[in-house]
Image (cartoon, grey):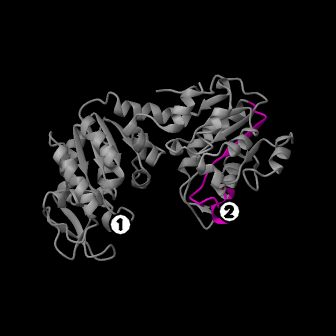
Amino acid sequence: MGLKSFIDTDLENKKVLVRFDFNVPIKNKVITDSSRIDLALPTIKLLLEKKVSKLVMMSHLGRPQGQNHPELSLEPIAHYIAEKLGIEVYLSESATDSGIKTLLNLGHIKIIMLENLRFHPEETQGDNEFAKILAEYGDIYINDAFGVCHRKHTSVYQLPGLYPKQSTFAGPLINKELSALTKLIEKPAKPFVCVIGGAKVKDKIKTLEKLLIKADKILIGGAMAYPFLKAQGQEVGNSLCSDEDVSIAKTLLSRDKGSKIHLPIDHIIASNPNSKPSIQDDKKIPLEQSGFDIGPKTQKHYQEFLSSAKTIFWNGPMGLFETDNFSHGTFFIAEAISKTDAFSVVGGGDSVSAVNKSGFSKDISHVSTGGGASLEFIEKGNLPAIQILKYTH
């Protein structure tokens, strides 16, 4: 599924408004993971090479709930892009600041960045009046923010509809995402093996239901595994495990007619995340202990399925990978996937972070920039903002 690209379009002397996803972790005004910005840099360079008169960039950062929170300003991102490209980036005081129109008329200014869209409650409300203000900043609209395409937010849902068809485009990152995810769900080469981790079963029930139909094997790890084990009657100690998740897991297991779902057969356990870990050699987790990672037998068991796979989808870590004692399972899976010849896709914030931390991301076919967006696309085969882009073409 490809959307219309601006690559072959003459953009010389045009004002171009682009929705990027610069929602990156920032601590004390320092960007701690710049990968989302780095992925957008080639698009920015290409637009400058096309001699646009103005490049107006917009993004959200965090969840400021429609309030101006200085710690969620896009200032560090504007500085980072300016440094990387060696060109000044002008940050507006707000996305509706009257000074933006002045900046648009100054010939020496090339790049303007709008301050955090979510400082305005209208952004998440899908507000047409807010969309009209934003539309005044560009002759051309480009959406390259896949990570928010599952939202009906103003900048990705209402805004493109205000432009004529010939002035609305999808950016290269969106088309790359659509190509990889469509390949995953439409005709995946078999065997198709999925690795699903993370915390709540409830959050991924729709994805799991879809994968039960599409996949040949579903390998479950992380906190996701404990409700499934409990649903099978296993003891899970103090492991993270809500009654609601156990109930959902029981339903999913009853629907698994082809024995596609595989669960951990051993664990790395501890009394708490800061205490000394030990290996629990079977499925049962003792009282007063919690599971924090998959064990060595499970790692090898899962590796066998992965080594023969032709298509792999991974979402969610296998344990508390941020802590060294409980990172081995996640990094083992990352390495196992990297060594296969399969078409592999990693999606979801924590799993992307884990695969980057593991050092094996370069050997993954596609690392998705959209967490919730990639899962929803797998569930539904479409997203609201993608549908709008298709409609406007």
Dot 2 amino acid type: Asn
Query: Which residue is more in the foreground, 52 or 256?
Result: 256
Q: Main secondary structure of the magenta part?
A: loop
Q: Would you say residue 336 is visible in this rendering?
A: no
Q: CA distance from mark 1 to mark 2?
A: 36 Å
| Residue 151 drawn at (x, y percent) | 52, 45
Looking at the rendered structure, the secondary structure element under dot 1 is helix
Query: Which residue is more in the foreground, 335 or 27?
Result: 27
Looking at the rendered structure, the secondary structure element under dot 2 is loop
Report the magenta residues as a range. 51-75
Q: Confirm whether the magenta stretch covers residue 269.
A: no
Q: Confirm whether the magenta stretch covers residue 59.
A: yes
Instruction: Residue under label 1, please give it.
Output: 324
| Residue 178 drawn at (x, y percent) | 46, 33
| Residue 33 drawn at (x, y percent) | 53, 56
Characterize the local packing of mark 1: few (<14), some (14-19) or many (20 or more) Cα atoms within 10 angstroms: few
How many tags in the picture?
2
| Residue 173 drawn at (x, y percent) | 54, 37
Characterize the local packing of mark 2: few (<14), some (14-19) or many (20 or more) Cα atoms within 10 angstroms: some
Q: Residue at x 16, y 47 (%)?
A: 254
Residue 68, labelled with which disc?
A: 2
264 horizontally vs 104: left or right: left
260 horizontally vs 189: left or right: left
Q: Would you say residue 187 is visible in this rendering?
A: yes
Query: Which residue is more in the foreground, 20 or 339?
Result: 20
36 to 53, vertically: above or below: below
> Residue 320: which quarter of the image?
bottom left
* Mark 1 or 2, closer to the camera: 2
